[in-house]
Image (cartoon, helix red, strand yellow):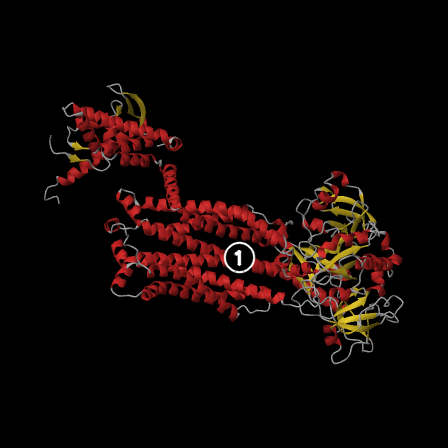
Amino acid sequence: MSLWTRVCSWTRSTVRPTRMERDMDEEMRFHIEAHASELMKRGITREKALRQARMEFGGVETTKAECRDAVGVSFLETLLQDVRHSVRAMLRTPVFTLTAIIVLALGIGATTAIFSVVDAVLLRPLAYRDSGRLVTILMYGDGPVSAGNYIDWRDQSRSFTTMSAAEYWSPNLTGIDSPEHIPGLKVTQDLFPMLGIKPLLGRLFLEGEDKKGADREVILSHRLWQRRFSSDPSVLGKPIALDGDAYVIVGVMPQGFQFAPFWATKAELWVPGAFGSRVHSSGGSLRIFARLKDAVSLAQARAEIASITARLEQQFPGTNRNVVVTPLKEKVVGTIETPLLVLLGAVAFVLLITCANVAHMLLARAATRQKEIAVRAALGARRGRIIRQFLTESILLGGVGGALGLLLAGLGTRALIALSPANIPRVQTVSIDINAAVFLFTATILTSVGFGLVPALQASSVNVNDTLKEGGRGGSEGVQRNRLRSMLVVSEFALALMLLIGAGLMIRTFAALEAVDPGFNPHNVISMIVSVAGSKEQAAGRREFFYRQLIDRVRSLPGVQAAGAINHLPLAGDLWGWHFAIEGRPKPGPGEVPGAVYRMVTPGYFGTMRLPLIRGRDITDSDNAIAPGVVIINEQAARQYWPGEDPIGQRVSFDDNERNPPTWLTIIGIAKDAKQDNWTDKATPEMYLAAFQNHDFLGDSSAEAASHMSYITLVARTVGDPAAVTSEMKEAAWSFDRNLAISQVVTMDGVVAEANAQPRFEMMLLSIFAAVALLLAAVGIYGVISYSASRRTHEIGVRMSLGATRADVLLLVARQGVWLAVAGSAAGLAGALLLSRLMAGLLYGVKPTDPLTFAAVAGGLGVVAMMACYIPARRAMWIDPMAALRYE
Amino acid sequence: MGKQLDLLQGTLDMLILKAISLSPLHGYGILLRIQQISKERLEIQQGSLYPALYRLEHHGWITSEWGESDNNRRARYYRMTAAGKRRLQAETERWNEMTAVIAGILQASPEEL
């Protein structure tokens, strides 16, 4: 038989099944009638003849079904039948259907949403050419590198095709309506070719443009181009003013391009960087990016850098230590990997619980449908057909649940992006993409088949005779099925318990974080960065006057209690550290030079922040440029560098070049330790210099320093809502000069919240998942207990008529549930002991095996289990024995 | 009417092909033709004819079209195709061979066993 006839036949039967049905009907009617008229010739009445003809023909419906099978109609036709049947079955039990669909949609939606995030952040390669070969070279794997080191590494190494450098640079875009502080990078010319990126418009930097004096080109990000230049293609060649200097726009990057992938993730413009200085130091401002040669392994490159830096360290003691080569991807996703994987694991648990729950909902229902199945089997339905019917039902459930889940995943992903802490890399690229869709589909199918198969197999092996004989009460509620359902409930409980412990540990972590004292009082404080770059206040002689006037004006605003300024806001701003010398102490050896984070503050800063001075005095207006230099140190500096001594009155110097004579700063006070960079970091030595005594701050030391430090961070303490004075503060600044760029307007409460955004995010998600899991597990145990109680109605009736008390009945029913809960909790506790250490990196102030959390969660879950058992047990308790006995 | 024989498994297809090898017939006609040739000695479950017809048509051994019956009613007529003709021939040969072998065995004398 040719393929063609087969296809034709199949098409006929599939495309026009109604025509085939009509034909069959007509043909068989004709047969029966023809036979009947033949019989009538023997002299019997038409009625009798027809009846006999029909009997001799046999079952019309069975014949038709066999005909359909013969042509192989089957697939679509039976599928349609199955679907129709399934929809009817589902509509008959709307509560079950709705519950199952919601449960599935939640499970699948949550899994997909989290998976989308994990996919975008962790799984997808970085959007650069052959990004697996890109590495970054940093001090301690984290800190910046000096230009001298960079040049030596680049010139001496053989492992890399290219080694580029980038430096953070955030200029003011001035000269157009509203000045703006724009994050950007200075990069070496070879960086973009190394990344394999082509510009959308214009060109990349040319060779030689990263030399001093030629570095006046700028490439814009797609967003900046859209936002500030209304996507105008003629911007190429146009000049713009950055920090008051003229730059020419030479290119626009494609949409979605991001560099750097970590640290300066928000860069919106790039200019050539001339990093020519050969100064070697332990500090610096460059981040190094390099591409491994094809034949070179990461280990070889690391070995080479280690030998180069060891050589350089001998040459320049105190530098080139702890240089780490890290694959770029690892650097980007490093800190977020664990939390995301923990979340993914958690959500997988939720999906498992979901499946278990729906599976035993289906099991319970399959049990109540045994009679229906037996009837169908008796009417000739084959085992495969019944299994198919069940599978169709569960795949339909899975399909509808999956579709809803996709919808939820869309919403959930958007919510995750909105809620996620700003420091998650690449989160802006999260979308429900093809990967996520494939995942969703697989999850749906696996879930459906998984929970559809077990009840289907069980139901189809029903013994027709037994079931029908038992008058429909389905006697085959065997040990096996019970064991399966119990196992499902036990695993649900175990999974829920593990999730709850995870959530509990995060809640305790978060509570511990909230309890951390930042050292200052963050409530009712607002801050903003005011930059003078590109304005007339930039001039060296004007800055001090302008800053003082501005702070005074802000302080006099209605609703403002106190105001001051600092160079970098703690927790939110940059962190500058430097080494210093202590007067009267011998010159320390390499590696023993004391160092501290240093900040520059104006009078009023400590009061505004309510950062208490433990001893000594505050910086005042009279600590000016002509007065002797002063400094306030924190408690940690006092403990570390003046143990057992009184630091007040001692003098330190931050002078780098051993200038003669050094500028000594007298320690006038000790401030409480305050948070600096990370919320959970231990206090490190910190020093507060008087801003108005500092030449860099005032912009009158050198041109480079003047552009480096051309801003202050204003802080103001308000009476009421700090955000309410934002516009007045901005206006106060702009009343001096419209060209002042104002950026990073934040409340201190917001800064603190941001510092804890990641643990809060993790806690929130884990808690949601745990709550869903708890609910599902409770529903599960309730379902099993009430189902088995209802099936034991007869037994209970017998027991009661034989003298069992209501308490006995309560115990009888509840005991089963308690056992399930105990077994589940035991398994869950064991699992949690094993798994919770995986989230050790997420925890703060609490051990992964925190006994309090474990006990509280196990206890709480026990109570929930009791309640879930109590309802059906109570119902069983009030069974009327007479009614129960009549019931069967 | 003599004793009726149950149809051997798988032989119905052959009988149908044979029945329509001379002229196209409708389903009931095929039944009558087989009964007539077999002198009513074969018992055919009437309904079972149709799955067989649909199967044969599906394989392309017969085709069907609607036509008028003797008493002017619409009836579906089955006709043999070239493939069906070859099929009938092959099946007949196979059948003859098999019956010969089986008959040979059944007629074997005690010495031959």
- Subunit of label 1: A
Residue A603 horizontal/vertical position (percent): 81, 65
Q: Which amino acid type is shown beneath numbered disc 1? A: Ile
Residue A92, image quadrant: top left
Left or right: B58 as drawn, with respect to A674: left
Residue B10 horizontal/vertical position (percent): 24, 36
**Which is more toward the observer, A203 or A541?**
A541
* Identity of the residue furthest to the left in this view: B110
For the C terminus of chain A, the quadrant is: bottom left
Picture mark count: 1
For the N terminus of chain A, the quadrant is: top left
Residue A40, image quadrant: top left
Up the image or down, A41 lies above or below A646; here it is: above
Left or right: A24 as drawn, with respect to A575: left
Q: Is residue A885 visible?
A: yes
Residue at coordinates 64% horizontally, 68% vertically from top-left?
Answer: A516
Circle 1 SS class: helix
Q: Is residue A740 visible?
A: no
**Which is more toward the observer, A864 or B106?**
A864
Report which residue position mark 1 lands on.
A768
**Which is more toward the observer, A247 or A117?**
A117
Residue A845 horizontal/vertical position (percent): 59, 69
Disc 1: CA contacts within 10 A as few (<14), some (14-19) or many (>=20): some
Residue at coordinates 52% horizontally, 50% vertically from top-left?
Answer: A112
Residue A410 horizontal/vertical position (percent): 55, 47
Left or right: B3 as drawn, with respect to A551: left
Residue A604, image quadrant: bottom right
